[in-house]
Image (tube, rainbow, N blue to C red):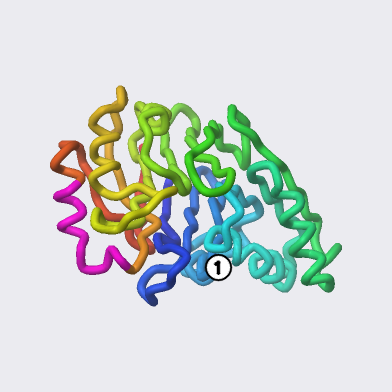
Amino acid sequence: MNVTFLGTGSAMPTGERVQTGLLLDADDETLLVDCGSGVLHALQRTDVGYEGVDTVLLTHHHLDHVSDLMVLLKARWLAGETSLTVAGPVGTKELLDGLLDVHEYMQDRMDLTVREVEPGSFTLAGFEVSAMETRHSMPCLAYRFERDGGPPFVFSGDTEAFEALIEFADGAAVLAHDCSFPDDVDVSNHPTPSTLGETLASADAEVGRVYLTHLYPHTDGRHEEMLDSVGEHYDGDVRFARDGLSIALR
């Protein structure tokens, strides 16, 4: 399984990071996880491109995770592709129906399949997926991805840090976790480095590597400080994700 961070930014653009999006690919099968603003451009810089992605899985419905959905739909239609599957938490069908009401000319342009998922296990685009609910300001799911018995990859979605989520990632080669702000920002619904480090240390889980993502402008120039804050509590391998970073899990 290959994991590419298409976008590691947040709802406040910096010009350096686009909004949230991850590309998973294995054995000629692909899955796009979230589709925030700028993700389509980042996707087109990969070998897969938007023609090669016919399945999208959403963590939740905030704008910085869904705003390129209709852009993707139209680009695939213009490129001659005929189908798109969008999966996500309960409410995903209502979201797509509303977007198509606004962009009425896109109705019936493609074979659009909408699938709503709940916490538990399911298969999507050839990946074995497990989902659990996170702690965010709207319903949001974290996902654990496995493929052909290979090492798992876990994406936290948007969330506060809590032990059950870290334990959900037990045995994962990589955990990509929300770390939106440095410690001096008073925030809920997202973790700071200290709270994430404390939670990583206290959870009963072994994780190979942690990548910090969903980064607000407040984190610019403060990466070393943030890593030090995590490291005061947790001695594992923690790094910052960046747009375009690709990781091969074998």
> Is 148 in front, or is 219?
219
Q: Position of residue 31 (x, y in %)?
A: 56, 49
Residue placed under numbered mark 1 in the picture: 40
- Left or right: 66 with respect to 108? left
Instruction: Give the SS element for disc 1.
Output: helix
Dominant SS in magenta:
helix
Name the image quarter holding the N terminus: top left
Q: Position of residue 89 (x, y in %)?
A: 64, 43
Asked whether residue 151 is in view, the answer is no
Q: Which residues are magenta?
A: 218-229
> Is 156 in front, or is 171?
156
Q: Position of residue 131 (x, y in %)?
A: 54, 34
> Which quadrant of the figure has residue 107?
bottom right
* Other-residue count near label 1 (Cα within 10 Å), few / some / many at <14 / 14–19 / ≥20: many
Q: Residue at x 55, y 64 (%)?
A: 49
Name the image quarter holding the C terminus: top left
Asked whether residue 73 is in view, the answer is yes
Q: Position of residue 242 (x, y in %)?
A: 33, 61
- Left or right: 227 with respect to 37? left
Q: Is residue 183 above or below residue 19?
A: above
Q: Residue at x 16, y 57 (%)?
A: 225
Q: Residue at x 68, y 50 (%)?
A: 86
- Left or right: 224 with respect to 114? left
**Farthest residue toward the bottom?**
15
Q: Is residue 32 above or below residue 1?
A: below
